[in-house]
Amino acid sequence: MLAQGAPDKQLLELRTYNFASPAKQKAFEDFMARAAVPALNRAGIQPVGVFKLLKDDNPALKLEADSTDLYILLPHKSFDSVLSMIGRLASDEVFTGMAQATLDTPKSDPAYTRFESSLMLAFDSVPKVEVPTKLSSDEAELLRTFAAGRGETVGEQGTSLFSRIKSAFS
């Protein structure tokens, strides 16, 4: 518990990694999937979210290409979890063995050019990050309404952002 009488809320760490190229971003995504996310899960940090901004999913932004930023959401149960995360990862021999090639890159050719970290407290109404498993009929209708506002339709196997979201949870 973070404060006397307050509901148990997670601390949400949002990390934004910047990359010099799409190839560097892809290599880091692979590292996250292969080594970092499993190690974070073993350290009690879950579910870990890894996201990126795609040009085709955001036509209103008029992006020239997919973003080379990667967003990592790390839900922590306590301040201690935030403070001890690096130490726990460093003591995870499986992780350190798999991470060495990515994290020990030379300064002249770094894995990423910069990262920012923001620490936020979850909302009272949504105190914990949960991975949805299936859309309810109300959620599906809300998705159709949002899609219609963007001039898209939500189909079973469509290629629009909203169709892909719906299929991921159906």
Image (cartoon, rainbow, N blue to C red):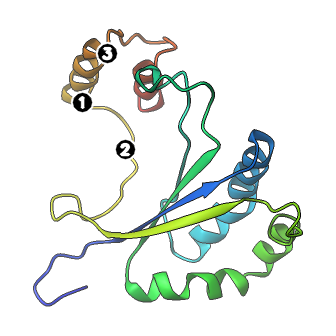
Count residues near mark 3 (Cα–Cα under 10 Å), then give few for <14, some for 14-19, many for 20+: few
Task: Looking at the picture, tell me which residue is in the foreground, 55 or 72.
Answer: 55
Taking the image as shown, residue 3 lies to the left or right of residue 96, namely left
User: Of marks 1 and 2, which one's residue comes earlier in the chain?
Assistant: 2
Residue at position x 40%, y 49% from top? 131
- Cα–Cα span, label 3 and label 1: 17 Å
Query: Which residue is labeled 1 in the image?
Result: 139
Q: How far apart are marks 2 and 3 (CA)?
A: 23 Å
Residue 161: x, y in percent? 45, 22
109 vs 127, left or right, is right
> Given the image, on which type of amino acid does mark 1 rest?
Glu
- What is the quadrant of the C terminus in the image? top left
Q: Which of marks 2 and 3 is in front?
A: 3
Q: Are marks 1 and 2 in contact (CB under 8 Å)?
A: yes
Residue 23 image point, x, y percent:
80, 42
> Tag 2, which secondary structure?
loop
Q: Where is residue 78 in the image (x, y as percent from the top left)?
A: 37, 83
- For marks 1 and 2, give the CA distance: 11 Å
Q: What element carries label 3?
A: loop
| Residue at 36 percent of width and 13 percent of height | 154
Q: Residue 150 carries which label?
A: 3
Please give the residue where the numbered disc 2 appears in the rendered image.
132
Three-letter code, disc 2: Pro
Closer to the eye: label 3 or 1: 3
